[in-house]
Image (cartoon, grey):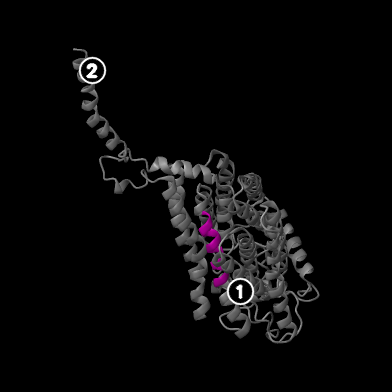
Amino acid sequence: MAKEIFHTSEKSNFILNMTEEKYAKLASYGLLAALFTTSLATAIPVVTGYSLFELPAAGLAVAGVICMILALIALMKKYVSGKLVFPICAFAAMILWGVVSLINSYDIGISFYGYNGRGEGLLALIFYLCFFITAASIRREKALKPLVYGLAALGLLNSAFAVIQVFTGRMSSFKYASTIIQVNAASGLSQSPLFLAMVLTLVITSSLIAFVSVKGAASKAFFIITVILCSFTMMFTYSFIGICGLVFAVIAAAIVVFRLKVSKAGLASVLAVIVPAAAAVGLVQAGLIGDISQYRLYDGRLLWFADAYYRISASGNIPNSDVLDIDNTYDVYTTLNDKTMNIISLHKLTGTGPEQLVFPQLYTFGILSEDDNPEITDVVVENTGTFDKVYNEYLYTAATRGIPSLIALIAVLVPILFIGFRRTKNGTWTQTCMFILSLGGVLIFFIGVSNTAFSPIFWTIAGCSIAQIAAPEKVREEAPAEKAPEKKAEPAAEKKTETAPAKKAQPKKKGSKKK
């Protein structure tokens, strides 16, 4: 019988009467929103050319509110397994310490909402927790498959915009790596080439795994086309993350082939990564892209000049060449890491505040006067050599939200990998895929940083990797029980009562024979 509160109707109590299967379906839709809304919202400023940086944050908020409701339902219905309490509590502890960091920050507004153009304040962290809980509450494998297809579709969408950016230089803030070097770097709808490389790492990996695992020519064609286009696009991010992402995807595909014992012919799918990547390099070497004729990495110029300084005024301009060789990728990353370590040593407990890594580096107002009450962006760009992101999420967390937040983050990620690995023993390719993607995200965070394009995907996948998915046999066994109307028993009962009088008439005949 349907549950009701205060004699209200069954429809108004849909949460109480929601089955696990219905919840899994709703959760799948909600998480698809988490994958797409930020990218779709980013499309507006990309197409129009206007600096509407609030829109990606608004897109994240829409998906966040949807999953916040779904997460509350999951907790009410107790769909969250008891084994997942520790990582969820650790995530909550990270947010609570973020509140302490926010109170002690330079600017409370930026700490909560995030820097304009970044949008990763404490509010975004709360939304990520909701994505994580919602995904971890799914117990049906068929709810995971749409996420794999959705991730591939997201990669195609980003790559479609990226191809236009690469061949025309339009709809992009990354046409130039400096005032004179035209590279036509791809950023898609991910706001930065480096962020796009992080997203495409997960897309290519999941699509390769899906290609060797799914049945059906149409599905295989969809995934292999995704791999080809995204691998081609990846090389135009001109980033170290992109190279590492392609290598990880190839290794992951090989592991899945042997782990799930699928056809060894599936290993040939790695050519869908290698050939398009080589073709992209060949186009650059031939001088057909921008005004460069040699392929190389531009991490430093893209993350420092094109993204932080030029696009959103979140950092100062590139430092002088006697301080840093901006074209040396190793020098760029080690310099960022070393300077961030110094900031951590001065702000061990609460950090600088979410999204405020640049603030303790400011050393002058330049031509601006304190009496003018200038905008923070005007102040930041006057300070050459400063930066707002270190491309190591673990250092960035410790620097902006304190060492306790870093400890909490590790307390979230380690159980995810441990539980996720154990979940792969159920034999389903979807959960194996989710675990490998989670592992990829954890590794990427050593050379990348959290952002609104990548993090919603990562925390969704992380939750899916530890979800307690019911075995397919168990789902088939439970299905008849849910549909078991006992109406079929009624005709049998009626038949029994009809034949009863005929049986009672038999003794009479026997009695009359004896007489």
> From the viewer's perspective, is 111 left or right of 263?
left
Q: Position of residue 38 (x, y in %)?
A: 51, 66
Question: Which callout, 2 or 1, points to the residue nearer the camera?
Answer: 2
- Residue 80 visible in the current orientation: no
- Between the C-alphas of marks 2 and 1, the distance is 96 Å
Coordinates of residue 500 in the picture (x, y in percent):
24, 27
Height in image: 55 above or below 513? Answer: below
Mark 2 Cα-neighbour bin, 10 Å: few <14, some 14–19, many ≥20? few
Query: On the rendered image, what quadrant is the N terminus found in?
Result: top left
Residue at the spot of label 1: 187
Q: Position of residue 97 (x, y in %)?
A: 58, 48
Depicted 216 relative to depicted 409: above or below: below
Left or right: 99 as drawn, with respect to 309: left
Q: In the image, what residue type sits under mark 2? A: Lys
Quadrant of the rendered image containing residue 297: bottom right
Q: Residue at x 21, y 26 (%)?
A: 501
N-term mark: 2 or 1: 1
Residue 400: x percent and y percent? 63, 57
Residue at 22% in and 31% down: 498
Identify the residue under disc 2.
Answer: 510
Q: Pick whichever, 155 or 454, lies toward us.
A: 155
Instruction: Please say whether residue 195 is visible from this viewpoint.
Output: yes
Give the quarter of the figure containing the C terminus.
top left
As drawn, the label of residue 281 is none
Magenta span: chief secondary structure = helix
Q: Which residues are magenta?
A: 144-157
Q: Quadrant of residue 320?
A: bottom right
Q: Residue furthest top?
A: 515
Residue type (three-letter) at the residue carrying disc 1: Ser
User: In this orientation, which residue lies closer to the viewer: 370 or 11?
Assistant: 11
Residue 344 quadrant: bottom right
